[in-house]
């Protein structure tokens, strides 16, 4: 990858996702990240009595190009596109179907994606961040569609 450009576009194949760590929690009011196990925002609890948090996706995904294998991070907007649901809906689904995380990774394996990547803003050698994701297979189905079919669940979301 060319290190100087702010974003790069690459065609790659999914190797796996880290299904053990797919989420992070934010305050539903100000969207500040809440470090686990914190489930309320100190800032907003004081000023607005807001005491709600919500789950967002943060997914680490290993991808392979013809030259290298590397890890990228998908935040909520790009991850939703692959999962076809919100993080909360997926989280609830995995509580009922404990292996859906593993299966999600298997389903995505080998999927060809066009990724636009940006380098992390702070220079702490973190993973490139996915700015946009385009599945290249015609008729790509979001993970939740495939999982719902796999588990014989009627899609209600
Ligand atoms: Zn807050």
Image (cartoon, rainbow, N blue to C red):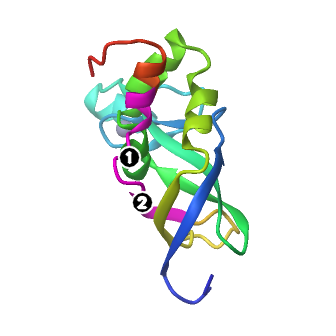
The residue tagged with tag 1: helix, strand or loop?
A: loop
Quadrant occupied by the N terminus: bottom right
- Residue marked by disc 2: 136
Which residue is nearer to you in this view: 122 or 14?
A: 14
Quadrant occupied by the C terminus: top left
Q: Are marks 1 and 2 in contact (CB under 8 Å)?
A: yes
Task: Write down the region rendered in magenta.
Answer: 129-146
| Distance CA(mark 1)–CA(mark 2) | 8 Å
Q: Which residue is found at the position 49% from the left and 25% from the top?
A: 39
- Place of residue 27 in the rendered image (x, y in percent of width and height, measured from the top left): 39, 35
Quadrant location, ligand no. 1: top left
Mark 1 C-beta closer than 8 Å to ligand 1: no
The residue tagged with tag 2: helix, strand or loop?
A: loop
Q: Which residue is found at the position 72% from the left and 75% from the top?
A: 67
Q: Which residue is found at the position 47% from the left and 40% from the top?
A: 57
- Place of residue 145 in the rendered image (x, y in percent of width and height, measured from the top left): 37, 29
Which residue is nearer to you in this view: 60 or 83?
A: 83
Q: Which residue is found at the position 26% from the left and 17% from the top?
A: 156
Dividing the picture into quadrants, the one containing residue 69 is bottom right
- Residue marked by disc 1: 140
- Place of residue 40 in the rendered image (x, y in percent of width and height, measured from the top left): 44, 27
Dividing the picture into quadrants, the one containing residue 2 is bottom right
């Amino acid at each position: 990858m060319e290190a100087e450009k702010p974003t790069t576009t690459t065609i790659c194949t999914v190797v796996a996702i880290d299904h053990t760590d797919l989420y992070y929690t934010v305050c539903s009011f100000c969207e500040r990240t809440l470090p686990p196990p914190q489930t309320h925002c100190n800032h907003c609890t004081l000023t607005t009595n807001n005491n709600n948090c919500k789950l967002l996706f943060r997914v680490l995904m290993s991808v392979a190009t013809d030259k290298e294998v590397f890890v990228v991070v998908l935040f909520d907007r790009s991850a939703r596109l692959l999962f076809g649901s919100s993080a909360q809906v997926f989280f609830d689904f995995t509580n009922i179907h404990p292996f859906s995380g593993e299966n999600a990774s298997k389903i995505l394996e080998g999927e060809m994606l066009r990724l636009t990547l940006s380098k992390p803003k702070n220079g702490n050698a973190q993973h490139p961040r996915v700015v946009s994701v385009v599945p290249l297979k015609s008729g790509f189905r979001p993970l939740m569609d495939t999982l719902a079919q796999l588990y014989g669940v009627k899609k209600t979301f």
